[in-house]
Image: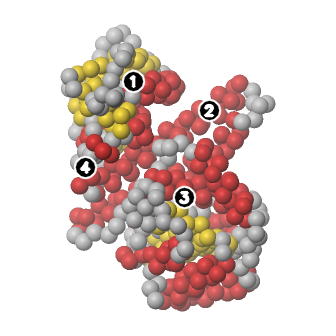
Amino acid sequence: MSLSLAAVRCLLAADVPPGRGDEDSVRRQWWAALATLQEDLLAPGAATRGVWLAAPLPALYEPQLLRRLQGWVWAPIGVESLLPGAAPLLPGQRGADPELGRGFRRLPLQEEDGTDPLLLLITPAVQVALALEGAPQARRLIVRFDAAVLSAALQRLLKRLGREDPAAAAALHGALQALGPLDNAPELALRFWPRLAERLAAMAPSVTLQPLVTARQDDSQNNSQDELALLEALTHEVRTPLATIRTLIRSLLRRSELTPLVRQRLEQIDSECSEQIDRFGLIFLAAELKRQPGNLQPLDASELARTDLSRLLEAMAELWERQLARRDLRLQLRILPDLPAVLSDPSRLETMLGGLMDRFSRGLPRGSLVRLSLQPAGARLKLRLSSEEVGGKATAAAEAALNEAEAGAAERVGPVLSWNPGTGSLQLSREATRQLFHRLGGRLTERGGSSLTVFFPLAEPSR
């Protein structure tokens, strides 16, 4: 009998209907399920004892749960040492809150375990297993409340712990014995699924978390794996609180008694959270494309869709105006009428355009004007971003921002990121940005320091 975590996921998946989701959709389901579990099923202060087991990173984020429950996490080897002295990647690491590290033990993730997320949580009130499983384009979220399946999964994990850390296995066995028989309330699933559906309906389509990379053989590939594993861990640390904050903010915004000033501040916080969540999604997408060179080719026309780029830009203009206004920048939109549709992936393109605007505008001086134009260019549409200072001159700061991946002031951070110590800006490199647009059917060019242009292929006329 295999004791790998992949085998545990297969056990949990028994009798579950085949999946039909892609990676993005199941990752959104995973995050919504974690929020539903911790914020709805486990009321604050309700779980006074219990255990949890997770891989490849901690899934729980509520501080009260982390303080009160005993946990074990199978994590990638060496993740905690990739960035010495940085903020803690995992509870129990040097520099972490000692309260959050109590009862939490890290164990090595093996190659045969796979990297799909897994969580088992056992408390007197709630016993549940969550996992992602399935081949590409056939992915599924697995949620099991039934005692027989949970018991079988726990037995395998106990045997796994007994092989790796007998003391940990004894501690887990004792904790489970003290909790008594597994006995979920019958209405637990009835509470879980409606709340999960509500969260998914409120979740922005661009909220994604890409999977942890698989093991490689040679040293250079292992270095790339380590970098991506670090990005995964950092993304977990950043996205989890941001997603929680945004959920709380949106629940507050539904209240009718808010003053205009309070509502404005809450909307600003919501926008900031969404902006940063999308930035990390782009970073991960670029890293995944870099890891698998075959994915750097443009998607087939059959995988792209007719996209009304004019309407998309007009819909995003209000959000961009608010974001730019926070840095005292202005936006001017110039879109010619009756432009044809282009071929692209509209769900990805929206996030990419947001990242492009952020990358272009981040280094501009206060008071600058950002010009965005869209017009025909032969068999393509040409989207152009340029900037002017208050006095009407093209900004030198734009040139510095666009060339920062190659500039001496910028520091390369792995294969897809650049870091500018002068501005504190961490963002996608020029090459990574170009590759992302190439994947979506676009072609990014930068002519002159203060502007950039993306060409999109036209879609066939609709019949």
Q: Horizontal and vertical percent for residue 58?
A: 54, 65
Disc number lying in front (1 or 4): 1
Residue occupied by mark 3: 30
Which comes before the other along the chain, label 3 or label 4? 3
Under mark 3, the amino acid is: Trp
Query: Mark number for residue 267?
Result: 2
Residue occupied by mark 4: 296
Render colour scheme: secondary structure
Under mark 4, the amino acid is: Leu
Tag 4, which secondary structure? helix
Disc number lying in front (4 or 2): 4
Which comes before the other along the chain, label 4 or label 2? 2
User: Please, which residue is most extreme toward the top here?
Assistant: 391
Picture residue at 22% right of the left edge, 39% below the top: 406
Q: CA distance from mark 1 to mark 3?
A: 33 Å
Judge whether residue 264 can be spotted in this image.
yes
271 left or right of 177 in image: left
Disc number lying in front (3 or 2): 3
Q: CA distance from mark 3 to mark 4?
A: 27 Å
User: Please, which residue is most extreme toward the right here?
Assistant: 257
Tag 2, which secondary structure? helix
Q: CA distance from mark 1 to mark 4?
A: 26 Å
Which comes before the other along the chain, label 1 or label 4? 4
Under mark 2, the amino acid is: Glu
Query: Mark number for residue 310?
Result: 1
Picture residue at 47% right of the left edge, 84% below the top: 3
**Whether label 3 touches label 2, CB < 8 Å:** no
Tag 3, which secondary structure? helix
